[in-house]
């Protein structure tokens, strides 16, 4: 049987090695043999570059090898080996067999499955961009202590590179608080104090000047970084926001909001660039910003 590769618009395969590193996958657990829907198989272990997103071979040599395997009619029914991460699967062994099954019109395959536990939601449609953004956000929460201080709360950013600036804000505050109390604070304690005395009050000020409307689809973390732009003023002795910080931050919000409205007035049909969504920590639930 010669495989027939039909048109497919699915994205590239996800490389399991990078997914595992970005999401911190650790323990591999046996599941056993089961029938798996082909649409739930989104990646590969070690061979993501050899196939496109629909497991069609990328080279002539590989196409010929698959055609030779397909000549044996029993091949299409042979089980493959998969690694499961939430609702997504990655091919560990049997790439050619899966390619043949897809070309034969199969909707599901038998597979020997091992599973990696994760609190994150992966499924059909998950992209490497979301994996990478989630990895950056997870690292930010871990190194600052926010993961322990505020379990389950998320800090999505439109540009993942901005996590370095957000991290600096939390760490600098923790250091200042340690000096003020003449003791070395745990990261978790400093992070909670940062959230209570800096981040949350800034969110309240932004809301008070209609910043939620002015700044459109910005995340809370985006708005926080915008608010503190150009500010080089220390916190008050009682850890309140001094008037100068409030003044400059408020002006930042209003100026950015004004620029945004002018841009929309000039180009009514212009689409705004959508941020890369983080992976949810609960099935079918959108990522959350921090509590208000």
Image (cartoon, rainbow, N blue to C red):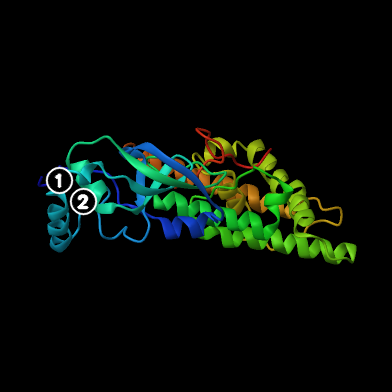
User: In the picture, residue 101 is in which quadrant?
Assistant: top left
User: Which percent across, then down, holds residue 264?
Assistant: 39, 40
Q: Residue at x 17, y 39 (%)?
A: 104
- Identify the image quadrant of the N terminus: top left
Would you name the residue on which mark 2 appears?
56
Residue 268 falls left or right of residue 230: left
What whole-number distance in Å separates the C-alpha atoms at marks 2 and 1? Answer: 7 Å
Q: Nearer the viewer, residue 118 or 268?
A: 118
Residue 178 falls left or right of residue 77: right
User: Which percent across, then down, holds residue 6?
Assistant: 15, 42
- Identify the image quadrant of the C terminus: top right
Residue 168 visible somewhere in the drawing:
yes
**Badge 2 vs badge 1, beta-carbon distance below 8 Å:** yes
Residue 64 falls left or right of residue 177: left
Q: Nearer the viewer, residue 285 or 15?
A: 15
Q: Secondary structure at mark 2?
A: loop
Classed neighbour count for the residue bearing mark 2: other residues with Cα under 10 Å, few (<14), some (14–19), many (≥20): many
Q: Residue at x 33, y 40 (%)?
A: 110
User: Which percent across, then down, holds residue 246?
Assistant: 70, 49
Residue 8 visible somewhere in the drawing:
no
Mark number displayed over residue 134 = none
Q: Residue furthest left?
A: 2
Please tell me whether residue 87 is drawn above or below residue 49 in the rendered image. Answer: above
Please tell me whether residue 146 is drawn above or below residue 32 in the rendered image. Answer: below
Would you name the residue on which mark 1 appears?
5
Q: Secondary structure at mark 1?
A: loop
Q: Nearer the viewer, residue 219 or 282?
A: 282
Q: Residue at x 54, y 57 (%)?
A: 136
């Amino acid at each position: 049987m010669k495989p027939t590769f039909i048109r497919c618009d699915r994205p590239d395969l996800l490389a399991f090695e990078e997914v595992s590193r970005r999401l911190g996958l650790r323990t591999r657990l046996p599941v056993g043999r089961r029938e798996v829907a082909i649409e739930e198989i989104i990646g590969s272990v070690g061979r993501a570059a050899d196939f496109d997103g629909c497991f069609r071979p990328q080279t002539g040599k590989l196409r010929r090898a698959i055609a030779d395997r397909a000549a044996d009619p029993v091949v299409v029914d042979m089980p493959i080996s998969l690694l499961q991460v939430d609702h997504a699967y990655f091919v560990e062994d049997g790439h050619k067999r899966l390619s043949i099954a897809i070309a034969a019109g199969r909707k599901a395959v038998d597979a020997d499955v091992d599973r990696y536990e994760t609190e994150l939601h992966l499924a059909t449609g998950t992209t490497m961009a979301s994996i990478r953004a989630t990895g950056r956000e997870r690292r930010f929460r871990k190194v600052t202590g926010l993961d322990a201080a505020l379990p389950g709360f998320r800090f999505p950013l439109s540009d993942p590179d901005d996590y370095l600036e957000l991290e600096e804000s939390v760490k600098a505050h923790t250091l200042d608080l340690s000096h003020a109390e003449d003791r070395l604070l745990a990261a978790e304690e400093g992070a909670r104090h940062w959230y209570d005395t800096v981040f949350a009050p800034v969110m309240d000020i932004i809301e008070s000047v209609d910043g939620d409307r002015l700044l459109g689809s910005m995340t809370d973390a985006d708005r926080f970084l915008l608010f503190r732009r150009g500010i080089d003023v220390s916190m008050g002795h009682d850890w309140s926001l001094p008037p100068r910080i409030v003044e400059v931050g408020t002006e930042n919000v209003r100026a950015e909001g004004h620029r945004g409205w002018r841009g929309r007035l000039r180009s009514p049909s212009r689409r705004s660039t959508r941020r890369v969504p983080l992976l949810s920590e609960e099935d079918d639930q959108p990522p959350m910003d921090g509590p208000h």
